[in-house]
Image: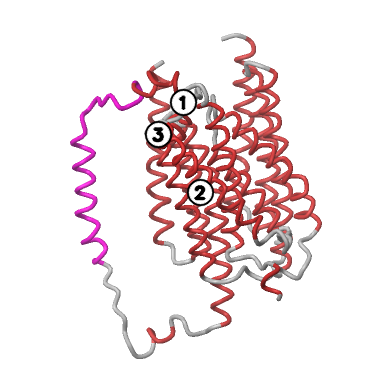
Amino acid sequence: MILSDYLSAALLIAGAVFFLAGTLGLLRFPDVYTRLHALTKADNVGLGLMVVGLAVQAESWAAAGKLLLIWLLILLAGASVAHLVAGGALQRGILPWKR
Amino acid sequence: MEAVILLQWTFDTFLGLGLLWLAWRALACPDLFRAIVLFVAFGLLLAMAWVSLDAPDVALAEAAIGAGLTGALLLAALARLRSSETNVEVAGQPEKKGLKVRNPQWLPVVVLLPVAAGLGYVVLSLPPDAVGLSAQVAANLETGGVSNPVTAVLLNFRGYDTLLEMVVLLLALLGVWSLGGAALRREDAPGLVLDTLSRLLAPVLILVAGYLLWVGAHAPGGAFQAGSVLGAAGVLLLLAGWRLHAGLAALPLRLALVAGSGIFLAMAVFTLLMEGQLLKYPPAQAGILILVLETAATVSIGVTLAALFLGGRPPNKQDHR
């Protein structure tokens, strides 16, 4: 293992931790809004860490660029879809959870 | 190394069990919306199974068509189902009152058990180390015109399969169109987020479709993957409230719909006359012929999928006379 392998492993594991936290939040949080929060925030960062971890191993700059592009697209789509789902839930009169 | 194999094996086992569980849940779920969500999750896991089997071409197609667009089509169908249920409150009523329609639960089991037994017998009676056709494909790849063996098989060696698939897609759309007109355009504005998202993503999706089409010659990709990405762009635009201009809905739309099948058929007839064999391209021109066929197929698949999502014949100028 060379240095870049350790770097990749660290980034991938950190990303996996974020995915785990997001999944836990999705399963355990009380309502749709808090679940969206857990899902989008954690997945965006988690995927970003994974993408950087994989980009370290990429054979060319073009491959690394494609990975980065995937992350940017998912950031855009994830944020928009979360907004749409939350907007739809508000329209249907689902009240945000209060302690 | 053994640890890696064990990890792979564990992952595959969970994947297989997860697929079976999701399939069962999707079938058994009484709530249709939930069943569709489960079906989409099933499609995504299935795509991962294809990746695990080293079949990235199939994985791409499964993720784009099986999980993505089929999910969108099912949701659109569900929305129409619900709106028709609120209009006509007849469905399901007579069953509850007088006529007791009995639906024996064991009947499908009786039918399916022999099928499962037969399938199991066939799988078990396969030779344990079959050669397959991959060696033959690799040997003939030189004359195929493309360096991606999957594209060579789909568009050249067994081009008639793809030709028939294109016709099947067209027939599906004809079936949907014969059921009625398109759903009416939503009156309320799509909202800033959806509007911006569709404006940003539609050009990117078209670019990705072109890339997938081009890269299919030497790497995973091709007409069906590109077409489904194009179809996704159409679905996104339709969701954002865009509708085809009435002047384009008559002949231009139909031309785009039949372009794939039409050019494929023309090519089949031409090669039959010139080379004496259906879809046997001259090796020197095979690459460019495949690109032409795939381009037409991509456009047709994309437009057909978007039209299927619209769920009915779009109104055109003739209708207004």
Where residue A58 appears, as percent x and y from the top left, is 63, 19
Q: Which residue is mark 3?
A: B12
The residue under label 2 is which amino acid type?
A: Ala
Position in image of residue B199 (x %, y %): 78, 49
User: Which label is found at residue B8?
Assistant: none
Q: Residues within 10 Å of mark 3 (few under 14, many from 20)?
A: some
Residue found farthest to the front: B273
* Residue farthest along the top direction in this orientation: A2
- Residue in view at x 66 percent, y 55 percent: B252
Residue at numbered disc 2: B41
Q: Earlier in the sequence, mark 1 or mark 3?
A: 3
The answer to whether dots 2 and 3 both sit on one chain is yes
Q: Magenta includes B128?
A: yes
Q: Give the alpha-carbon distance from disc 2 to disc 3, as whole Å.
A: 16 Å
Q: Mark 1 highlights which residue?
A: B282
Q: Chain of mark 1?
A: B
SS assignment for the magenta stretch, majority: helix
Spatial CA distance of label 1 from label 3 is 43 Å
